[in-house]
Amino acid sequence: VPSVIALLKYGSGFPFNRFAGLQGNFGIPLPASTQWDIVHQAARPLFPVLDELARQAALGDIVYNDDTMARILDWMGKRAKHKAFGEDTDEIVLNKDGSPRCGMYTTGIVSTCENRRIALFFTGRRHAGENLKDVLTHRTEALPPPIQMCDPLSRNMPDELKTIVANCLAHGRRQFVDVVDAFPKEVEYVLRALEEVYKNDATARTQKLSPEARLRFHQAESGPVMKDLREWMTRQIDQRLVEPNSGLGEAISYRTKRWEKFTLFLRQAGAPLDNNICERALKKAILHRKNSLFYKTRTGAAVGDCLMSLIYTCELNGARSFEYLTALQEHEPLVRRTLELWLPWNFQEAVRSAQPTAA
């Protein structure tokens, strides 16, 4: 039962009250408060597994991060004022100017290493870059800095974060799509250039090229395309073919100012083109927000983050979420002793090893 409720709530965005209505139609009422008690109790032994996933994520070659808005009811309205400046002082996060931060966010982090992908969610007042920094404190010093793929927002990249930064091509592309009605020919030129780059990347995936071979392929095939695109954009501004303050001018400026980070894939082996994998991960949090509106307490947000992280990591690695959550609960004592053997990509072997042998 706990695994089913967790998958419905945090995997498919099914609110507790809606599931209570469904259960009532079966003649087996299961109130929303009871569902929370069941999920809360089941989630407690899962937090050490989440910590182990965070340690593993810190070792990744590429880390993707981004934010979406979140709501925690206890941090809103009158209760928020009381807690922010009263007994809940641990939750005060200061902006750079020293003022208390009022916003609430869910951060999505996806870390990739070889064929493994780990998804982590963090809900609170911290930005994506701050949460990523906390994760990377577990990174071994002997490892080189990871590639960080994110949107070019300052909150994604605190000053202390030591990564090789790449910016999202798809995000920059949207700047041009937004002005297509006013500048159809110019936008078409940009989109066709980016289409060639994405086709080349798809070819590299189809051919299963190594990161180094993919880099050489992009340098040969995508390099000239991106060079021509940059020269074209520079010419639009220098020759006053486009008004700098127009929508197209701002889109061009946005890209040219960050050109090195947008084109890291032409210089760094393994660098991705975009942050789409993280944006897809955040759809889990967005679906939950659309259907349930908010978390009631910080504890509720922590439980949601934990279960969402485990469920989506299973999905990214082709594991069955129901089977995984059930296995963690059934073998709780063994899981606590050997966390590294109970991750989504290897837990089935651990389950087999835990089974008593036939006489």
Image (cartoon, rainbow, N blue to C red):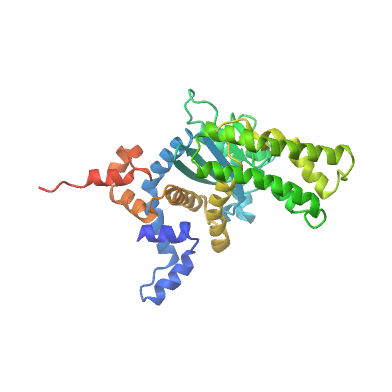
**Residue ID at (39%, 48%):** 44
Q: Is residue 102 visible?
A: no
Horizontal relation, residue 22 to residue 70: left or right: left
User: Measured from the top left, where is residue 252 in percent x and y?
Assistant: 78, 42
**Residue ID at (40%, 74%):** 24
Q: Quadrant of residue 239?
A: top right
117 and 231: which one is in front? 231
Q: Looking at this rendering, what residue extends furthest in the top direction?
A: 142
Q: How many marks?
A: 0
User: Measured from the top left, where is residue 325 in percent x and y?
Assistant: 36, 52
Q: Quadrant of residue 151?
A: top right
Horizontal relation, residue 89 to residue 47: left or right: right
Q: Is residue 208 above or below residue 180?
A: above
Q: Is residue 258 above or below residue 72?
A: above
**Residue ID at (63%, 39%):** 156
Q: Is residue 248 above or below residue 216?
A: below
User: Measured from the top left, where is residue 192 in percent x and y?
Assistant: 70, 48
Horizontal relation, residue 117 to residue 126: left or right: left
1 and 196: which one is in front? 196
User: Measured from the top left, where is residue 21 in percent x and y?
Assistant: 45, 72
Q: Is residue 3 above or below residue 98?
A: below
Q: Looking at this rendering, what residue extends furthest in the left direction?
A: 359
Horizontal relation, residue 4 to residue 206: left or right: left
Q: Looking at this rendering, what residue extends furthest in the right direction?
A: 240
**Residue ID at (68%, 41%):** 153
Q: Is residue 143 visible?
A: yes
User: Which quarter of the figure is the N terminus placed in?
Assistant: bottom left
